[in-house]
Amino acid sequence: MKNKVLYFIIMVMCAVQASGCSHNDSIVSVSVSVFEKEMMSDSVQLLDVRTPEEYAEGHINGATNINVQSDNFREMAVRELSKDSTVLVYCRSGRRSLTAAEILIKLGYKVVNLKGGIIDWKENGRSVTDSKIAGVYEDGNDGSTLVLRQKNSKIYQVEISLFRLTQLDGVGKPNGNSLTFSAIDSSGEPICGEVLIKGNTARLLITTSTWKYLPEGTAFTFERK
């Protein structure tokens, strides 16, 4: 009887372990050298799924940043990524990128995950690029936020949440430590502006707007979180 109980416990434990690992079976995880070779293909997309703050401190050149821990990760992935090209995904150590890979595979993407993340990438002598612009900035007085997310070397995603707005999303083009951006307000009218970065401070200036709540010349100051 005891032997049967022990056998049953062992079988249950094996089943639990097997089910716990099965969600990774369809995810291809590769070493730094293989990942780097994959990057040389023209038909790939490089995705960093860490936070904007981590991304700003150092990322693999050419990577798009979509935080897998954000509530709208799936929505942003569908908007930013093409299903016609393989997604090369990485994070800090390889854990969050596995979560992202699982989500992306369910959405219909082909995914290759960097085993060991950017930690292994750097430990194997590969370089990273930092961004003096990208990051999350906040106005401590009213909770307004400015998020600058680098999509590639020429384009930034600009997300502005002001105390009078729910959300304003635009596209920015960098020029040194500044960028110009354009967005569309809730009535379909264009809103344009400039962001100047000095150290940890970001100054946002509205240059074009027909919205009475956000007139031309309005300026905001944010501090990097």
Image (cartoon, rainbow, N blue to C red):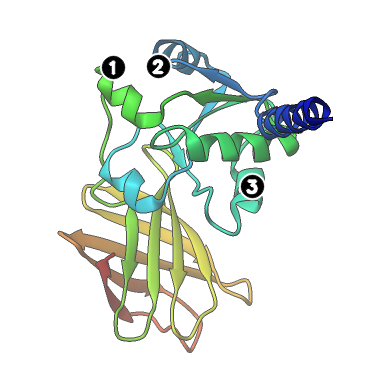
> In x, y percent, where is residue 51?
41, 50
The C terminus, quarter of image: bottom left
- Between disc 2 and disc 3, whose residue precedes? 2
- Crowding at mark 3 (Cα within 10 Å: few <14, some 14-19, many 20+): few
CA separation in Å, label 3 and label 1: 33 Å
CA separation in Å, label 2 and label 3: 28 Å
172 or 46, which is in the foreground? 46
Q: Which structural element holds mark 2?
A: helix
CA separation in Å, label 2 and label 1: 7 Å
Report the residue that reaches farthest toward the front. 1
Task: Indicate which disc residue 115 carries.
Answer: none
Q: Is residue 134 above or below residue 3?
A: below
Task: Indicate which disc residue 79 carries.
Answer: 3
Q: Quadrant of residue 129?
A: top left
Report the residue at 53% width, 48% height from top.
68
Report the residue at 56% width, 34% height from top.
98
Q: Quadrant of residue 128?
A: top left
The N terminus, quarter of image: top right
Q: Amino acid at mark 1?
A: Asn
Q: What residue sits right under mark 1 in the picture?
A: 124
Q: What residue sits right under mark 2 in the picture?
A: 32
